[in-house]
Each structure stands twice: as structure tokens, then as C-alpha cells.
């Protein structure tokens, strides 16, 4: 399961030329949101646009010399995990395109559900795409809109009206930073300040590392821009009255536990998920253990509520990157063992409650149960901090196709048997909502309820957005 991307934007109030290293540290703190590529674009008062992208981790892509070379008074940054488009340098961000009087550089977190048709319209108008991502579509839509409209606020509102999906955007138009959160605020985006700099980022952990204070979360459909050393806020007229739909998976899995998103601590939400799991699935056992790292707070919550000791039964190898999709169960087990090694002396002869954040395909959980039992666990009770995932995500989370989602095809008892666990229990939708602490009507719960907050184009419904995107062929020569 992959989320898509982390973004940072920084505006220096007095034209200080030091934003690049702050963006670098912000991206470093957001590394969990994307490890495939990283990029920074800045505006330098003397030289105009500075720009560098590369494949790999933030530390692979940038060194001190490059960061110094990116000196600027305003800039944006991006870390990427692909959900649309392949993992290749052409798909790295920020994207950049020239305007008649300057440039636009843009970085995006989210997925545009209808970008296939928007892309085809742009190709018909003569646009040539360097990448196969939806983010480049948004960049060219802005460029196209500038042909008919000079007012940047109207340009961005007009573009927003064409987009269906999730989008947190940082946009550099020459020396001005514009920041947009989509009308349903699906992806997180937060505003802060450190010294003479205004900062925006996907998560508040990016602020902690550069000692920035949180000012507030951005509102749904809010466009921020920075002028005359002031923050200016503009709610897109087209976004007024729209419902909120914050992605519940940020709290369950994606975000770092030390982040605060839409005023809710991710750590506390996960602690409450653990407590709720105990209320709904009280089990007598010797040990509660997490599948590290994202399930640690929920396992602590379960242990506190139940009085069962919390322990570590699986040790995570932090240096494992992507593993290939393994065709056989034996090979998949090796991949799981590479990441998670059982502590035999902690497990031997014990009945264990294992807390995991979610089950998508079920293959990892199956390997995990087998590994724990092989290491000596007498009983394995799997409890899951997210209700059964029964439908794909179309908003930037590469879950799987419906065919691949185990809970879309099997009942809970059938899944339990397949995993080989003594117990399989999921948190209920109601308890998850309560644990997060946000009204259910303000959350996106599409993948666990099939009630999506936007319309989904018909031809997209059967499969995940990622697979759909691979099939987009573009207009024929005749249509062009
Ligand atoms: S469908 Fe699921 S993963 Fe996708 S945005 Fe909604 S809650 Fe998040």
C-alpha cells in the first residue's frame, strides 16, 4: 500500500535567500510519504528559477553543494511515491513549464480522478507531456488558463472546477508562492511559521525539524498566497459549500504518529484505535505485540486497555527498501522475513495478540502468522486497526484492485482460516471514526464503505486508478 507524495513550500518574508535548506529538512521529515524521487524548485532574486530533481531518497538526491546552488527566497519541494505513472525521473516533481513572462513550477499530493480526459483535451490543444502523471496535467491546465485570464486567483479557481479528486498543491509562479488544498481537503496541508519564513507542508512533522510553529490547517478549497510579507487567504468561490472528506488512512497508517492533522494527533488516534480494538475484541493472551512501526501506538492502546503486557515479537529491519512482488508463498515469506524478524525467546509457548494497521491483499498477514507460529507462538490473534478494505482508492492511495482485495472477496471467517490465525478481528467503522475524533461525514471512508465523496468515472469503477491510468492511450492522430 502506498500513499502518494509529500510537499513543502516556503516563503521568506524579507527576501532572505535561505529557503532551500529549510525545504530540504522539511522533505527529509516527510520521507515516509515517498521514497522514489525528490525535487526542489526555488526562485532566486538574481537568477530566477533554480531546479533539481532526482531518483531516490532526499539524501541520495541532494548534497550540501546542490542545496547551496538552490539558494532562493521562495521555493517548493516534493517527495514521490508513484500511484499514477511509473517510477522514473520524468515523473519526478516539481514539474516546470514556461509562461510568456516567466515560469510555473508545481508539486502535487493526491490523484486527479478525471485526469485521463483532461490530458487528452490538452494533447489535442498541442501540449506534449514529459511524464505520465496527473500532476503534469494540472500544471498545463494552469498554463492553458493563463491564455484567457490574467487574474491568478481566477485562473486557479477555473482549473479547480475542472478537477475531480484529491489535490494539495504548492505552485511557484515566478517569485510568488500559491498553495491550494482541494475543496474536500482530502489530503493534509498545514500552515506554519519559523522566524521570517511562512511554511506549508503535508504534515506538521516537517515543521518540528525546522522549529516552525503551527498556525493552522488549511481550509477546504483555500488558496494561500504570500504578498507584502503577509499571508493572504482566498476561498475558491467554486469550493464554497463543499463537504470535507479527509482521508481516514492518514490516521490509520500513512502519517507519522508525531504529526497533528486537522487538529487531531495521529498518535492519540492510534492509541484510541487500540483501546477500541480491545473493547470490540477482548482476548485473553500473554502478550500484545505490534507489527512495527505504524501499529505501535495501537498495540500500546490495546495493552493499556486489556492489562496484557506489551512486548516486541517482531523486529523491523529498517534498511529494506522495495521488495519485488513475489509469485510464490515461500518467496513472499522471505520478503516478510527480510523486513520483520521474529524474536523467538519472546514468542515461545505464548498466546499473542498481534495488532496490524490494515489488511489489503492478505498475503503479508498470512506469512506473518506462519512466521510467528514457526517461531514458537502457541496462538496468534490478529486484530486490525482498520475495517475491512473492500474497495479501491481513487484518490492517490495505491491499494489494489477489487479482485486483489481479500476482504472484497471473502468473509472475515474465511480470511481468518486462510491466514491460519486463531482469531481475526477488525475495528468497526463507527469505532474508527470515534478514535480519529472527526465527524464521519467529514471523512473519506470510500475504501471501507464504497461510499466515495466524489463521482467516479464509470470506466474507472471496476479497477484501481493506477491500472486504469496504464490503459490511457491518448487521442488518435486523427483526433489531434
Ligand atoms: S478511498 Fe480510502 S485510502 Fe482513498 S482517500 Fe478515501 S479513505 Fe483514503
Image (spheres, rainbow, N blue to C red):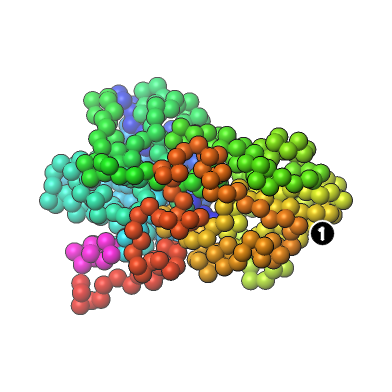
Farthest residue, direction bottom: 478
For the stretch drawn in magenta, the main secondary structure is helix
Residue at left 24%, top 51%?
A: 161
Q: Label 1, secondary structure: give it.
A: helix
Magenta span includes 118? yes
Depth order, front residue of 201/361: 361
Magenta segment: 117-128
Q: Is residue 327 above or below residue 223?
A: below
Residue at left 48%, top 26%?
A: 211
- The image shows residue 40 at horizontal and vertical percentages of 39, 43
Residue 226: image quadrant is top left
Depth order, front residue of 466/308: 308
Mark 1: few/some/many CA within 10 Å (<14, 14-19, 20+): some
Q: Quick one: quadrant of the N terminus?
A: bottom right
- The image shows residue 163 at horizontal and vertical percentages of 29, 54
**Left or right for 178, reference 380:** left
Residue 51: image quadrant is top left
Provide the residue designation for mark 1.
374
Magenta span includes 191? no
**Left or right for 448, reference 129:** right
**Left or right for 260, reference 428:** left
Farthest residue, direction top: 195
- The image shows residue 215 at horizontal and vertical percentages of 39, 26
Q: Is residue 452 above or below residue 226?
A: below
Amino acid at each position: 500500500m502506498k500513499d502518494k507524495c509529500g510537499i513543502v513550500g516556503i516563503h521568506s518574508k524579507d527576501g532572505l535567500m535561505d529557503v532551500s535548506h529549510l525545504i530540504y529538512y522539511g522533505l527529509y521529515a516527510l520521507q515516509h510519504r515517498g521514497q522514489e524521487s525528490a525535487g526542489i524548485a526555488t526562485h532566486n532574486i538574481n537568477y530566477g528559477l533554480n531546479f533539481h530533481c532526482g531518483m531516490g531518497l532526499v539524501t541520495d538526491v541532494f548534497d550540501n553543494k546542490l542545496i547551496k546552488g538552490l539558494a532562493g527566497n521562495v521555493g517548493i519541494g516534493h517527495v514521490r511515491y508513484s500511484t499514477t505513472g511509473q517510477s522514473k525521473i520524468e515523473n519526478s516533481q516539481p514539474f516546470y513549464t514556461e509562461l510568456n513572462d516567466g515560469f510555473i513550477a508545481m508539486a502535487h499530493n493526491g490523484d486527479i480522478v478525471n485526469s485521463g480526459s483532461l490530458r487528452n483535451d490538452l494533447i489535442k490543444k498541442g501540449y506534449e507531456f514529459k511524464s505520465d502523471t496527473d500532476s503534469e496535467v494540472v500544471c498545463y491546465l494552469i498554463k492553458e488558463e493563463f491564455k484567457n485570464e490574467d487574474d491568478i486567483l481566477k485562473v486557479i479557481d477555473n482549473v479547480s472546477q475542472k478537477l475531480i479528486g484529491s489535490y494539495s498543491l504548492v505552485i511557484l509562479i515566478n517569485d510568488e508562492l500559491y498553495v491550494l488544498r482541494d475543496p474536500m481537503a482530502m489530503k493534509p496541508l498545514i500552515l506554519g511559521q519559523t522566524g521570517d519564513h511562512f511554511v506549508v507542508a503535508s504534515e506538521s512533522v516537517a515543521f518540528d525539524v525546522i522549529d516552525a510553529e503551527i498556525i493552522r490547517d488549511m481550509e477546504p478549497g483555500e488558496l494561500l498566497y504570500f504578498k507584502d510579507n503577509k499571508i493572504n487567504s482566498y476561498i475558491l468561490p467554486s469550493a464554497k459549500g463543499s463537504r470535507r472528506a479527509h482521508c481516514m488512512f492518514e490516521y490509520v497508517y500513512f502519517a507519522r504518529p508525531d504529526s497533528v492533522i486537522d487538529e487531531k494527533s495521529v498518535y492519540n488516534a492510534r492509541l484510541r484505535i487500540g483501546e477500541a480494538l480491545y473493547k470490540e475484541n477482548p482476548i485473553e493472551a500473554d502478550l500484545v505485540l505490534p507489527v512495527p512501526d505504524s501499529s505501535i501506538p495501537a498495540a500500546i492502546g490495546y495493552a493499556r486497555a486489556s492489562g496484557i503486557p506489551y512486548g516486541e515479537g517482531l523486529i523491523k529491519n529498517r534498511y529494506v527498501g522495495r521488495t519485488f512482488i513475489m509469485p510464490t508463498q515461500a518467496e513472499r515469506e522471505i520478503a516478510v522475513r527480510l523486513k520483520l524478524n521474529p524474536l523467538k525467546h519472546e514468542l515461545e509457548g505464548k498466546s499473542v495478540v498481534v495488532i496490524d494497521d490494515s489488511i489489503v491483499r492478505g498475503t503479508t498477514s498470512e506469512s506473518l502468522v506462519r512466521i510467528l507460529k514457526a517461531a514458537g507462538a502457541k496462538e496468534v490473534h490478529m486484530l486490525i486497526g482498520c475495517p475491512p478494505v473492500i474497495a479501491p482508492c481513487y484518490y492517490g492511495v495505491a491499494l489494489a484492485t477489487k479482485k486483489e482485495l481479500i476482504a472484497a472477496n471473502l468473509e472475515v471467517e474465511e480470511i481468518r482460516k486462510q491466514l491460519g490465525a486463531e482469531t481475526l478481528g477488525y475495528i468497526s467503522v463507527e469505532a474508527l471514526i470515534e478514535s480519529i475524533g472527526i465527524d464521519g461525514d467529514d471523512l473519506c471512508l470510500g475504501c471501507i464503505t464504497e461510499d466515495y465523496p466524489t463521482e467516479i468515472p464509470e470506466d474507472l469503477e471496476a479497477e484501481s486508478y493506477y491500472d486504469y491510468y496504464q490503459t490511457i492511450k491518448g487521442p488518435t492522430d486523427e483526433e489531434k
